[in-house]
Amino acid sequence: MLKPLLAAAIALSLAGCASEPWAGRGDREATRTYQALALADLQRAAIADPLRPADEVARDPLRHPDRILAFAGVAPGWRIADIRPGAGYFSRLFARVVGDTGKVYAFVPNRTAERENGRADALVAAYPNVARVNGDLDTMSFPEPLDAVFMSQEYHDFHIPAFNTDVARMNRAIFAALKPGGVFIVIDHAGRAGTGHSEVLTLHRIEGASLRAEVEAAGFVFDGESTAVANPADDRTTNVFDEAIRGRTDQFVYRFRKPG
């Protein structure tokens, strides 16, 4: 099913480009514009994937997958790891975008494998370009160099003592897993300035500046941020599972790049 989706996206792009003044030009600007349009259509096709569960589609207005995919820059042929993917909200989208020539690694930590392997295996059964990988977070590795590592609302958890994870080592392992120029995308619940990771257990929040400093210490270069899931109305003092704020927390989206 991946090839028909890609063909449809390209057909949409060609139809939209035919009347543009730069159509058919061979210069770099024209090529970049076409590729951006083609990728945007492919991302829209991924969001419209009929295999996506209804409960995940219902979350789209809050999770803004179109903006997240655009910010991450995921493209056909990419190798990407989704760290602790849960039910696979983003893994499904990635699988459609990277297509038959790409790969999505659903990484399930050994610590939570007993209860999470089944959900990852359901993704593998539904999408032939998804593979489950297990391992310890701070020594994670993959069968091939990656274009991207993605982590949504999980980073703060790995500071919780029960996960028994050396976060600095984890960041270095992610750095090592990426190709030169590869990206590490992190989405997480924002904590108040100055709180660092002191509220990861009580509120399940982490200060963005603290997270950024930890990731940069592993050798990454900060490469931008998105406000796709920001919510200035959240005062960041409430546990993210409280129904008063659940699903609507103030979140940051950071992109880090491995130099090279």
Image (cartoon, rainbow, N blue to C red):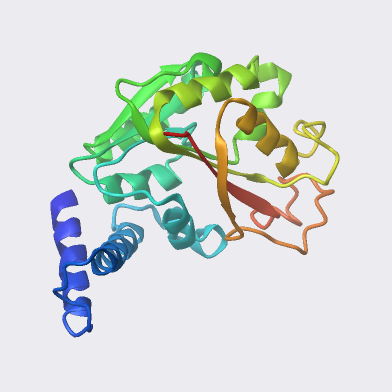
Residue 149 drawn above or below residue 17: above
Q: Residue placed at 29% from the left, 57% from the top?
A: 49
Spot occupied by residue 209 in the image (x, y as percentages of width and height):
73, 41
Q: Quadrant of the C terminus?
A: top left
Q: Residue placed at 69% from the left, 18% from the top?
A: 162
Spot occupied by residue 150 in the image (x, y as percentages of width and height):
47, 39
Q: Residue placed at 21% from the left, 67% from the top?
A: 27
In screen coordinates, is 75 left or right of 90? left
Between residue 22 and residue 55, name the one nearer to us: 22
Residue 17 drawn above or below residue 10: below
In screen coordinates, is 170 left or right of 2? right
Res 181 seen here:
yes
Between residue 136 and residue 179, name the one nearer to us: 179
Asked which quadrant contains residue 250, the reply is bottom right
Spot occupied by residue 51 in the image (x, y as percentages of width and height):
30, 52
Counting the numbered discs, the total is: 0
Between residue 181 and residue 237, name the one nearer to us: 181
In screen coordinates, is 12 left or right of 241? left
Spot occupied by residue 163 in the image (x, y as percentages of width and height):
64, 19
Res 111 seen here:
no
Asked which quadrant contains residue 156, the reply is top right
Residue 40 drawn above or below residue 245: below
Residue 131 drawn above or below residue 55: above
In screen coordinates, is 245 left or right of 11? right
Q: Residue placed at 30% from the left, 60% from the top?
A: 39
